[in-house]
Amino acid sequence: ERIDQLRLEQPGCVHAHMDLLKAALRLSPWLPAELLADALEVAIAARSLDVAASPYDASAYGLPPIRVELPSGRDEYRAAQVELMHRAAPVRAALRAAFDAYLQAAFCPADVAAAEAAPGEDRFAVATPAGPPWRKALLQRPERTSLPKR
C-alpha cells in the first residue's frame, strides 16, 4: 500500500534519493535555497549512479560504468549506494522537518489530522503491467472517499 511508502522506504534506494528532489521542488517556495540545492545534488548523484550501473555506456560523458553483472561491480555499486544513503540522510531529515513546519504553519491541526485519517485517493493508485495508467485506474476505482466537508 502507498500509505506505507514512507515507513517501508529503503534509505539506500537510488530512486528514493531522486524523489527527494521532487519533494524539495514541491516545497521550494518554503525552503531555504541551500536545502533545494542539497536535494538537487543528491538527485544528480543518485541518477549518475543509476546510469553508471545501467547497460548503457556513458563513459564519453565522464561516467565510468559500474559492471553490476560482476561480483566486483556489485560490491562497487553497494558501496556507492551506502555512501549516497549517508549523504542523503541529512537532506531527507531536513526536508521532513521543513514539511512538518509547513504543515503546522499552513493548516490547523484538525485539518492535518483529517487529511491523515482520510488520505487522498492518489495515495492508493496502482499501475499494473499492461493495465491502464495509474491515474486512469484511479478514476475507474469503484469506491470513492473524500475528506469531510468543513
Image (cartoon, rainbow, N blue to C red):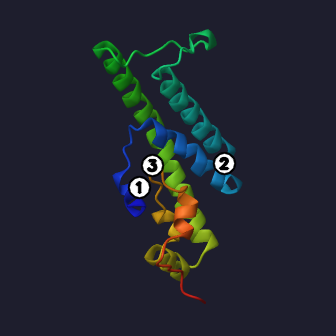
Q: Which mark is residue 129?
A: 3
Q: Amino acid at mark 2?
A: Pro
Q: Amino acid at mark 1?
A: Leu
- Find residue 2 and report its horizontal and vertical position in percent: 42, 60
Question: Which mark is nearer the camera, 3 or 2?
Answer: 3
Q: Which mark is residue 32?
A: 2
Q: SS for tag 3?
A: loop
Crowd tier of the residue under label 3, counting other residues whose Cα lies within 10 Å: few below 14, some 14–19, many 20 or above: few
Q: Tell me the distance, in whole angstroms, between the alpha carbons under discs 3 and 2.
A: 39 Å
Q: SS for tag 1?
A: helix
Q: Quadrant of residue 34?
A: top right
Q: Which residue is mark 1?
A: 6
Whether residue 128 is situated above or below residue 20 in the rendered picture: below
Q: Tell me the distance, in whole angstroms, between the alpha carbons under discs 3 and 1.
A: 23 Å
Disc with the residue nearer the chain's start (2 vs 1): 1
Quarter in which the N terminus is drawn: bottom left
In this view, the residue farthest toward the front is 130
Q: SS for tag 2?
A: loop
